[in-house]
């Protein structure tokens, strides 16, 4: 895929993939949305770092799964950990 250079060059990517895509660096999410009249409510990691080891996690005891989910919930809004997320969700309120 010729767009791979975007990742290596630390650039955002907008273009055609298997669908139309917009890949943005986590540090650019908030500056991107500043152009809109929105109030930030939350910027969260949807799947957290847990998606990287989902199969192993789900094979653990319910108590262990609950402990990991609790940890993920506690750190889901840490901006320094957003790059570990599979997806990021920006929740806002229109202030117009």
Image: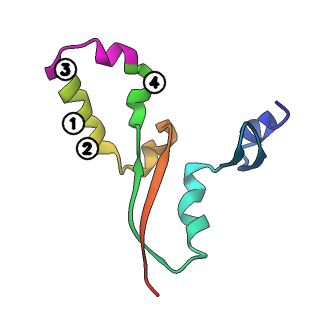
- Among all residues in the image, which is located at the extreme bottom? 96
- How far apart in space, not on screen, are marks 4 and 2 (Cα)? 18 Å
Q: Secondary structure at mark 4?
A: helix
- Among all residues in the image, which is located at the extreme left? 63
Q: To which residue does mark 3 refer? A: 64
Q: Which residue is painted at 35% across and 13% down in the image?
A: 56
Q: Secondary structure at mark 3?
A: helix
Q: Nearer the viewer, mark 4 or mark 2?
A: 4
- Residue 71 placement (x, y as % from top left): 25, 35
Q: Is residue 1 magenta?
A: no
Q: To which residue does mark 4 refer? A: 52
Q: Nearer the viewer, mark 3 or mark 2?
A: 3
Q: Which region shows up in magenta?
A: 55-63
- Among all residues in the image, which is located at the extreme right? 2
Q: To which residue does mark 1 refer? A: 70
Q: Contact, CB < 8 Å: mark 1 with mark 3?
A: no
Q: Secondary structure at mark 1?
A: helix
- How far apart in space, not on screen, are marks 1 and 2 (Cα)? 6 Å
Crowdedness of circle 3 by 10 Å Cα count: few (<14), some, many (20+)? few
- How far apart in space, not on screen, are marks 1 and 3 (Cα)? 10 Å
| Of pointers 3 and 2, the one earlier in the residue sequence | 3
């Amino acid at each position: 895929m010729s767009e791979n250079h975007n990742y290596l060059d630390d650039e955002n990517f907008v273009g055609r993939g298997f669908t139309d895509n917009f890949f943005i660096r986590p540090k650019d999410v908030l500056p991107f949305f500043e152009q809109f009249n929105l109030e930030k409510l939350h910027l969260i990691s949807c799947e957290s770092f847990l998606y990287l080891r989902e199969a192993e996690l789900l094979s653990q005891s319910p108590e262990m799964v609950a402990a990991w989910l609790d940890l993920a919930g506690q750190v889901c809004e840490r901006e320094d950990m957003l790059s570990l997320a599979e997806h990021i969700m920006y929740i806002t309120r229109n202030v117009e």
